[in-house]
């Protein structure tokens, strides 16, 4: 097969893929992410405070198009969505970063990594144009947080993380995909501070609307 035939075959496969695809935000056929849904992913930063007082800046509300896109990135392996979602994250991450800042994603469990093949917070940081520092690790596995209240979530994740290296007073900003109560971010901040990092804030791609105010 000559090069022209190869290009035609590849082009045909891509066209077939697009025809079989549906928009991640609205299920419109023939598009991976339609212009209308892409426009909805324009960040509208909102500030939150966790139960322990950590300031969190979220780029999007976790509902509608944004929620569907995040679920398809996390559950369906549609990693192409990390690019527009990462661009939204960059809007809240960039103002927190200096040349000496450590960008620390919340750790992913081994089971989630095996299931997906990638770590969602790290992937989003990279697509936002930054290099994540894998400083935190999970030392205990919390139960599923769904259905738990604020205090139950805090107890569930307490002492489940540890820093892999000393911070030496370095400034760190925490990054996660979605904030609900903020318990996971509080635990991550505790682990970093115990290792000598300074943690003043965190950023997330989205925040659940029912937790818009803590």
Image (spheres, rainbow, N blue to C red):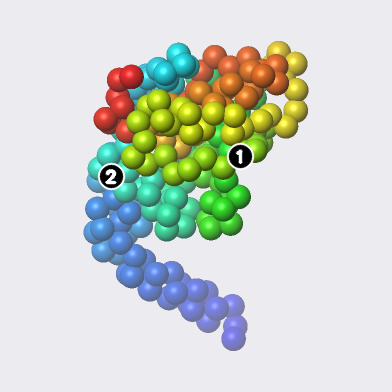
Q: Nearer the viewer, residue 118 or 138?
A: 138
Q: Secondary structure at mark 1?
A: loop
Q: Secondary structure at mark 2?
A: helix
The circle drawn on residue 118 is none
- The answer to whether residue 123 is visible is no
Rendered view: 48 above or below 163: above
Q: Nearer the viewer, residue 214 or 94?
A: 214
Q: Quadrant of the C terminus?
A: top left
Residue 134 coordinates in the image, percent (x, y): 66, 36
- The answer to whether residue 5 is visible is yes
Whether residues under marks 2 and 1 lie with C-beta atoms below 8 angstroms apart, the answer is no
Rendered view: 44 above or below 138: above
Q: Earlier in the sequence, mark 2 or mark 1?
A: 2
Q: Please give the count of numbered marks on the rendered protein.
A: 2
Please tell me in which quadrant of the rendered image residue 67 appears.
top left
Q: CA distance from mark 2 to mark 1?
A: 33 Å
Residue 179 coordinates in the image, percent (x, y): 41, 31
Q: Which residue is mark 2?
A: 65
| Residue depicted at x 32% and y 33% | 208
Residue 32 coordinates in the image, percent (x, y): 35, 57
Q: Is residue 158 left or right of residue 214?
A: right
How crowded pointer 2 is (Cα within 10 Å; few <14, some 14-19, many 20+) is rated as many
* Mark in the foreground, 2 or 1: 1
| Residue depicted at x 34% and y 65% | 21
Q: Nearer the viewer, residue 52 or 87?
A: 52
| Residue depicted at x 32% and y 37% | 62
Residue 35 coordinates in the image, percent (x, y): 28, 48
Outermost residue toward the bottom in this view: 1
Q: Quadrant of the N terminus?
A: bottom right
Rendered view: 75 above or below 121: below
The circle drawn on residue 140 is 1
């Amino acid at each position: 097969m000559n090069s022209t035939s190869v290009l035609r075959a590849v082009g045909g496969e891509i066209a077939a893929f697009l025809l079989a695809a549906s928009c991640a935000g609205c299920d419109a056929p023939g598009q991976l992410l339609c212009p209308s849904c892409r426009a909805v992913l324009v960040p509208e930063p909102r500030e939150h405070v966790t139960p322990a007082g950590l300031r969190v800046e979220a780029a999007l509300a976790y509902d509608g198009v944004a929620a569907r896109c995040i679920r398809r990135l996390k559950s369906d392996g549609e990693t192409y969505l990390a690019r527009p979602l990462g661009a939204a994250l960059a809007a809240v991450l960039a103002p927190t970063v200096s040349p000496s800042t450590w960008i620390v994603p919340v750790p992913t469990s081994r089971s989630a990594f095996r299931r997906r093949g990638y770590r969602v917070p790290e992937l989003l940081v990279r697509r936002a144009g930054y290099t994540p520092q894998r400083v935190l690790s999970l030392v205990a596995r919390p139960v599923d947080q769904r259905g738990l209240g604020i205090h139950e979530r805090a107890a569930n994740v307490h002492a489940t993380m540890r820093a892999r290296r000393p911070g030496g007073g370095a400034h760190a900003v925490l990054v996660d995909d979605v904030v609900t109560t903020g318990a996971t971010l509080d635990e991550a901040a505790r682990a970093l501070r115990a290792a000598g990092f300074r943690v003043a804030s965190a950023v997330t791609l989205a925040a659940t609307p029912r937790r818009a105010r803590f």
